[in-house]
Amino acid sequence: MSQSFRTILLFGFVAVLIIGTGILQGPNLALVILNMGLVSAIMALGVNLQWGIAGLFNVGIMGFVALGGLAVVLTSMPPVPEAWAAGGVRAWFSVLLAACTVAGSALMFKRTRKGWLVGLMLLVGFVCYRWVRDPAVSAIEAVDPAATGYLGGLGLPVILAWPVGGLLAAGAAWVIGKTALGLRSDYLAIATLGISEIVIAIIKNEDWLSRGVKNVNGLPRPVPNEIDLQNDPGFVESAAGYGFDPTIASTLYVKIGYSLLFTVVLVILLVLAQFALNSPWGRMMRAIRDNEVSARAMGKDVTFRHLQVFILGSAICGIAGAMMTTLDGLFAPTAYQPLRYTFLIWVMVIVGGSGNNLGAVLGGFLIWFLWVQVETLGPGIMTFLTSGLAEGSELKAHLMSSVAHMRLLTMGVILLLVLRFSPRGLLPEK
Amino acid sequence: MDFLNALVALSNFVLIPAMTYGSQLALGALGVTLVYGILRFSNFAHGDTMAFGTMSVILFTWLFQSMGISLHPLPTALLAIPFGIAATALLMLGTDRVVYRFYRAQKAKPVIVVMVSLGVMFIYNGLTRFILGAEEQRFMDGERFIIRAREFKEMTGLREGLAFKTTQGLTILTAVVVVIVLFWFLNKTRTGKSMRAFSDNEDLALLSGINPERVVMVTWIIVAALVTIAGTLYGLDKSYKPFTYFQLLLPIFAAAIVGGLGSPVGAIAGGFVIAFSEVAVTYAWKKVLVYLLPESLEPEGLVQLLATEYKFAVSFMILVIVLLIKPTGIFKGKSV
């Protein structure tokens, strides 16, 4: 079976799965799966760039996804003038001060190699930072805490937040890459895992920035609102013309709108990634991945290339994160869990086929489909499995209530099976 | 008097909690370091193994409680630990047989085995949640305090109270005993020596007739014991929640790396370095400073360097600093 035939077959299979869901469980669920599948595919594409093509082991994907989400808040929410008046400039100035302190210390360490001097500089910088920041932050957070209590965003169209999310993630990736990319693969993994936890901790705690755990809801949308559509007589009429109930028609309309937007982004990124993979640059990256020493001997700047591809991959994850937050219409930092936003993406890349962009995209759709379906079908299967047990027995009740955790188990089993029997994934690298 | 008060406040809020936490991290990091030394990969399933071990201890504790067996004034969980270790060891040996052995025979690259451990992590994660759920569980019983704050105040006449919880005492004591036994085992027994030989130079160890499968088996059993004890102590001291245990992965790895991966002494040192810095950076120092500084200099704020939620940031910062200055950790770990 040739590779391209296999690709078509597997993508066809995923399409059948999603369309089948649409027929059996309603088009709404199918579109929900499709939309998040598109976002997951983009994340998997980003990780594939880092792992599949360059061999970088990044387990901090969650951090970049969350930064993308933060970008949506910072770009598209309307600004809160009272909060800005209370101390917006001062708060951002403190952030600038902190950044300068860190950068200055790093530079100082490079120049002088004196640990105590750097320590002193960090200490002084930290005290100044807290002295500038604390009053501003408490003033901002005191502005109508129930509704705002933060600075708000720039009030720009939400689509703009997607590239901004990419930029934000790229900036973070640059800082991380500069410090951590020299480390060996295991250390890099722990370092990125740590950084993603720190990003989440910052977003949860800095209430002045994005309301912390109080969440930001009602984010602007790139597509019309369902309620507006239902109140639009023209829309109701045309929906009725196709024989649809206006409520259902409006939800489908909105979801299809998202699907189209996401598909455009995915196709653009996929085409770019394919060009990159097949270009001289892609060959060089694979050469570095396969044998770093000989690539270095050929005069390739391995450190720089690693940094470059790390930034690119992280930026893609940031874009996907921004898209996801836009789709949810809600920025909730507590929702970011490493199992879901880091390790699940890894399962997608490995199952799909690392090193193959189409494989990563396929893995994104397939694993996302399973992740959703194991939860919706799980109770049904469990009911069937426990039908032999007496009604009302404790074991049955327990099994039924823990069925939600089935999907973690399923993902683990799938990952292990693929690694064992098809270690190069469903669509192996050519 | 003020100095004594400051000292008591310091012990109460910083030294004792950090000692306790450090012991728990050290035990966890020993497990990571042993797996890294002998099996040569970073085990991402470590946190979830800890959750599994603790979960089995909790289940046995409940069983004993329902049978009316107790160790009063000590927590019943202590009695359940050996059974928990047995269950965890069975699970880990089973996992090794079904999963890891294949890659060992293939001599797969370490990073591939790390991926495999991700899969194992998912499975353990699902397993613990499936059996006991994702909610928080408390399974501490028996006497809660060795010294109560009020009694201490009455006894000494100081303004600051010192509370010493049973779990804190138990943790520190158990950790000391476990570490002594482990080092005795590694340095004095034949099996321990063969483990160290295997860790130092695999080929040479094989040539001198050491059975690798036996070394690996013993390693998994020791790791099972370490994680179960560490997890149970942490659960007794705080509470059991699968997600918290998963998150412990980061400070534990940080401890192992800071000390030097593959070095048992390093793991212990790393555990305490991480624990003390986490507690020190996130503690509000006002209470101690009030006693030490003259009244005119009394601090206005809480003098808390970072909010408690940033404790991961602390372990991570130390990790980065140590890696930049001494890439193999304080005690010269190894790298595969």
Image (cartoon, coloured by chain):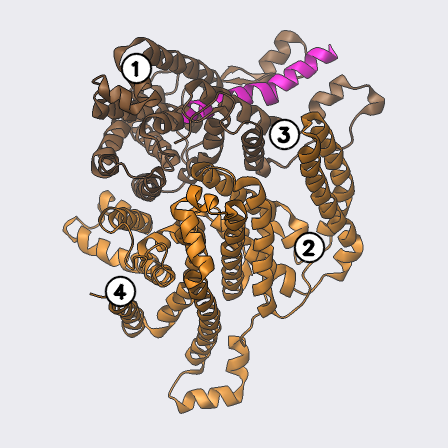
Chain colours: A orange, B brown
Residue at left 42%, top 35%?
B245
Which residue is tagged 3? Answer: B281
- Chain that bears disc 3: B
Q: Chain of mark 1?
A: B
Residue at 16% across, 48% down: A389
- Which span is picked out in magenta? B1-29
Eye-nearest disc, 4 or 2: 4
Mark 3 crowd level (few <14, some 14–19, many ≥20, 10 Å Cα): some
* Picture quadrant where residue B68 is located: top left
Q: CA distance from mark 4 to mark 2?
A: 52 Å
Disc 4 to disc 3: CB gap under 8 Å: no
Q: Are marks 3 and 2 on the same chain?
A: no
Q: Is residue B104 left or right of residue A42?
A: left
Q: Nearer the viewer, mark 3 or mark 2?
A: 3
The answer to whether residue B141 of the structure is visible from this angle is yes
Q: Please name the residue that numbered disc 1 is placed on.
A: B192
Task: Name which quarter of the figure residue A241 lies in.
Answer: bottom left
Camera-side residue of A105 and A372: A105
Q: Is residue B85 visible?
A: no
Are labels 4 and 2 on one chain?
Answer: yes
Q: Which residue is mark 4?
A: A3
Q: What residue type is disc 4 on?
A: Gln
Query: Tag on residue A150?
Result: 2
Q: Are marks 2 and 1 in contact (CB under 8 Å)?
A: no
Q: Secondary structure at mark 3?
A: helix
CA gap between label 3 and label 2 equals 26 Å
Q: In the rendered structure, which amino acid carries the disc numbered 2?
A: Tyr
How many numbered tags mark residues here? Answer: 4
